[in-house]
Image (tube, helix red, strand yellow):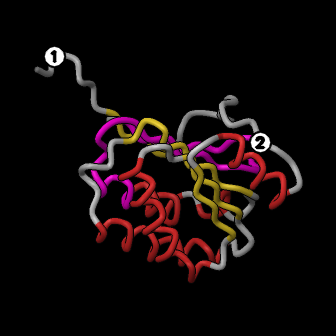
Amino acid sequence: MYLAIEFVDAGSGIRLVTRGAVPGALIVNAHRTIADEHLEAFARVTYWFANHTALNASPLEHSHARSVAVTDVRLAQANPGLVVGSLVPGDLEFGMVRTWQSLADRTGWRVGTFRDEQNLQAFFEESIGRSIDLHGPADGPPVVVYAESDAGAS
């Protein structure tokens, strides 16, 4: 299980990366940490890229999507023009992110959920006028990170 949020692209982007069975409560806590501890930097970003290509959504519930959306409404007060693009190839995971997307309508953000990088890049090009480096380096260490080693798990 792994979740990280990091600033990228010289502070103009923020990236959320999930891998494995990430409990929904951790996703909720990650968004709250951004709102509570990194709001000033968050207010300056142009885009948010959520990479859920390796997420196992089995521990996620509708209540988690609702809680994240409530926090995101608060984040939208600091950054009302944000563009959010999610890369989510799995069916269950795609459905959970789309649930969040419908609940987050109140943010006013431009949001797109995609199964492939080409359509995600087209969305960013249309929305912010350029493509983004989906896999580029972070500006520094993640500002939020939860990791659990599965070494020794049976």
Left or right: 4 in relation to 92: right
In contact (CB < 8 Å): disc 1 and disc 2: no
Q: Is residue 42 above or below residue 76?
A: above
> Which residue is drawn at the image coordinates 25% and 49% (left, top)?
58
* Residue at the (64%, 55%) spot, across then down: 85
| Helix, strand or loop for disc 1 | loop
Residue 121 inside the magenta-drawn segment: no
The residue under label 2 is which amino acid type?
Ile
State the SS at label 2.
loop
Q: Give the quarter of the image for residue 137.
A: top right
Left or right side of 145 for 109: right
Local crowd size for mark 2, using a 10 Å CA cut-off: few (<14), some (14–19), many (≥20) = some
Horizontally, residue 148 falls left or right of residue 134, namely left
- Which one is in front, 61 or 142? 61
Residue topped by disc 1: 152
| Residue at image mark 2 | 132
At which x and y percent is residue 120?
A: 68, 48
Residue at 71 percent of width and 56 percent of height: 47
Q: Amino acid at mark 1?
A: Gly
Of residues 58 and 77, the one drawn nearer to the viewer in this rendering? 58
Q: Which span of residues is magenta-colored?
A: 2-29
Question: Quarter of the image holding residue 154?
Answer: top left
Lower position in the chain sequence, tag 1 or tag 2: 2
User: Measured from the top left, where is residue 93 in percent x and y?
Assistant: 40, 51
In the rendered image, is residue 35 in sight?
yes
Toward the front, the furthest residue is 91
